[in-house]
Image: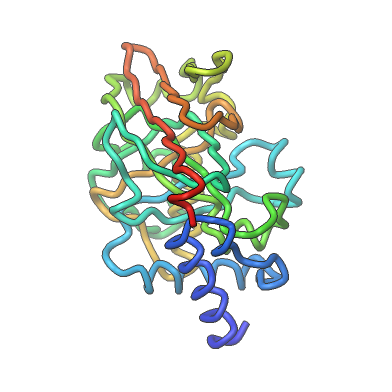
Amino acid sequence: MDQGAASGITDRLIEARRQGNAAGAVALECAPATVDDAYQVQEITAQRLGGLVAGYKIGLTAPGPRQAMGATAPIAGFLPADAILSSPASARVTARHMRVAEAELVVELARDLLPGDGPVTVADVAGAVAALYAGIEICDCRFISDDVPLPALIADNGFADRLVIGDRLDLPVDQLDTIPVRLDRSQGSSVEGSTARIDGGPLAAIAWLANHLAARGQFLRAGQKVATGSCTGITTLEADETVIVVFPGPATASFTFQQVSAEEER
């Protein structure tokens, strides 16, 4: 994709982020056609938004979702600093917002992660963990349709909207692959989950991300936070609903959707 076309899509996606309503949504016909083009759009978006990338989300970390999207690998999305919130958190959203929440194990990095003589390994990641947190990823779609093909999903930053950072977990890094997780809803049934949903475990997901970024001339930096993949699948919430994620400890994180009125949305 040439730079002009990628910049044009980026402009539309950034405006959709700013407006946050149907008037700002991007037509699906504008989406890039390939995964490589989609990551090009994502990278230009990060540059345009400015500031350092404060973290990343990893998506499609389970075989079922990957197969459904026609993907052969997980996907990545960047998180600017203003998208990372401390629990308890809330946000005012329009009626068009997806209102999707996912329980996530969040890893903060103690040092940069770059490939050496070979690819980044799980052992490399384990040695770079600074802290573990209970987290909630909030997802949204900037395209008019929520049913988007893989390149559109990636161009839209993997539907990343916000990441809520909750309590710190006190767990050994070699015991992260089968952590039970519960997502409690104020207007619905609880959802049981586990880090076992993440293919290979959370550290393997970060190793994939580090190698993916290296292939694109980037790297994971000390201090960045990584949401390692959904432990509870996709949960769509009601308007004005609160969600609480509970890890062992207990270590929790909470987020409340506050839907704006129709008058405010105009």
Q: Quadrant of residue 93?
A: top left
Image x and y of residue 171, in percent? 32, 20
Q: Is 11 situated above or below 51?
A: below
Left or right of 77, for residue 98: right
In the rendered image, the quadrant that contains the N terminus is bottom right
Image x and y of residue 106, in percent? 37, 35
Q: Is 66 situated above or below 19?
A: above
Residue shown at the point (69%, 40%) measured from the top left: 65
Left or right of 266, for residue 147: right
Q: Is 44 situated above or below 4?
A: above
Residue shown at the point (62%, 56%) measured from the top left: 153
Instruction: Tell which of 46 and 248 is nearer to you.
Output: 46
Q: Quadrant of residue 143?
A: bottom right
Residue shown at the point (53%, 21%) measured from the top left: 194
Residue lying farthest front? Answer: 263
Residue shown at the point (42%, 36%) measured from the top left: 258
- Work out whether residue 212 can be spotted: yes
Image x and y of residue 205, in percent? 50, 41
Image x and y of residue 103, in percent? 48, 29
Instruction: Tell which of 5 and 241 is nearer to you.
Output: 241
The mark total stands at: 0
Q: Is 200 situated above or below 25?
A: above
- Work out whether residue 128 can be spotted: no
